[in-house]
Image: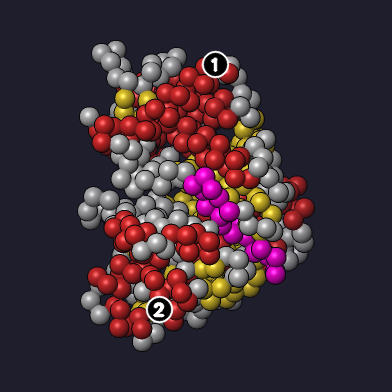
Amino acid sequence: MPGYILSIDQGTTGSTVVVLDEDARVRGRGYREFPQHFPRPGWVEHDVDEIWASVLDALADAVSEAGVALGDCAGIGITNQRETTVVWERSTGRAIHRAIVWQDRRTADRCRALEREGLEPLFRERTGLVLDPYFSGTKIGWLLDEVPRARPRADAGELAFGTIDSWLVWRLSGGAVHITDATNASRTLLYDIGRGRWDEELAKHLRVPLVMLPEVRSCSERYAVTKGVPGLPDGIPVAGIAGDQQAALFGQTCFEVGSAKCTYGTGAFLLMNTGTEKVSSTHGLLTTIAWRLGDETVYALEGSAFIAGAAVQWLRDGLGIIESAGAVERLARSVESSGDVVFVPALTGLGAPHWDPDARGLLMGLSRDTTAAHIARATLEGIAAQVTDLAEAMAQDAGRPISRLRVDGGASQNGLMMQYQADMLDVAVDRPTMVESTALGAGYLAGLAVGLYPDRQTVVRAHRIARTFEPAMDDATRRTHRSRWLGAVAKARSAEGVA
């Protein structure tokens, strides 16, 4: 079948669109950033109209670079920043408030109140998640409580909730379809991942009306067709959806139980395929849906570090010690080590396995001879050290260590950091030719649904490893680095950490 797939990767700081051909190879790419809004400390918001504009611009750039005819588009795949919460009017499609981003911490008190009610075990058992402001459920409640008349309008069925995938499908279909997929539903605190349905009891605890929730579908099927989208003809099937980290797991072809990947974007996200049986975590990780194809649901263990590439952005925008994110590796390589400087990048609290929203970033081990280069190197090491925490917890939960790690995301192009990651994990780290695996995964799912790709072997054959980083650190040095890091994390989580 001739044709191509448009894969939309709607991320936290920008939107990417890639064009995949019938051999699952990238033919064109477009990218546009959009503004971040920080109305208060700890609050992060997005204007969904700015997101939509960035998607349309990236789409036009990708199609132009690929040199393809719009009429040959066989389908559209979508992957998205997860947990980011939008509530909009069904009648107009207008959002009632800016989207509340996954990084936002405004509902930390609400999560603590639910914990005091003894509800944490119930939520963990049914959703695989912990009670944390990271997830969508408490964000929805905040919007319904704080936006005038939102709650009675939601009860009356006038308002719709969605993660960004839902909202994009709504826009792409001209408001005809209100759906999500199982992976995004599993990130809301509202979805029973074992029974595969919205949970009425959890919704009551979060005070979220079921009537405003989208229909949950599989990750690879025809959901809708385009209608009235600037720059696109009507009638193109929207046929693949997965949250960004699950899409990356699929895009990295981690189809075997035990295979794992880590995506280094704004945050860092480590996922391991655990098969058709969900594995409950006792070490602070999440149990989540990896994908649903037809009637089969595959699960994953996940560990999330909230700050990864965002720490490099902080060096650039907050401290001004680099002019561009790409300059951080060159600066870090100008010194042989971090000089005992340790940076814990808890700039928005700590995610797994600690789940401490009150933790704060910590820079320690400074001396008179500390330079910007030492801080830059410590920042890269801090990002990799967080992932090592996740990997150690994952090995204990899964009953098996990660034997090899596949990496992707923009920050994975930092060779110094990837080498340190291999050293700290003591396993080989594989970086593919195409590091935007999130977009690949969504495109693969759409291509399978419309028949452009006959089976998974098509995408397996297209997957190429560009470089492997082999561990080169001796055990004694590794133990020293781990001990120093764990001591710093303890300080970041305590009052003494800010002294």
- On the rendered image, what quadrant is the N terminus found in? bottom right
Residue placed under numbered mark 2 in the picture:
209
Q: Identify the residue at horizontal 54%, vertical 16% (top origin).
A: 476
Q: Position of residue 301 (x, y in %)?
A: 58, 50
Is residue 7 depicted above or below 397 in this figure? below
The amino acid on which the numbered mark 2 sits, given as a three-letter code, is: Pro
Q: Which mark is residue 270?
A: none
Q: Mark 2–mark 1 contact, CB under 8 Å? A: no
Q: Identify the residue at horizontal 27%, vertical 72% (top origin).
A: 145
Q: Identify the residue at horizontal 60%, vertical 70% (top origin).
A: 195
Distance between mark 2 and mark 1 Cα atoms? 55 Å
Give 225 or 338, whichever is nearer the viewer.
338
Q: Identify the residue at horizontal 31%, vertical 28% (top origin).
A: 363
For label 2, the SS is loop
Within the image, what quadrant is residue 75 found in?
bottom right
Is residue 375 depicted above or below 169 in this figure? above
Give 251 or 494, whichever is nearer the viewer.
494
Within the image, what quadrant is residue 444 found in?
bottom right
- Residue 4 is covered by the magenta coloring: no
For label 1, the SS is helix
Give 416 or 281, whichever is nearer the viewer.
281
Q: Position of residue 422 (x, y in %)?
A: 58, 28
The amino acid on which the numbered mark 1 sits, given as a three-letter code, is: Ala
Give 90 or 141, whichever is nearer the viewer.
141
Residue placed under numbered mark 1 in the picture:
476
Magenta-colored span: 280-297
Is residue 138 depicted above or below 313 in this figure? below
The earlier-in-sequence mark between 2 and 1 is 2
- Residue 288 is covered by the magenta coloring: yes
> Can residue 473 be spotted in the picture?
yes
Crowding near pointer 2: few (<14 within 10 Å), some, many (20+)? many
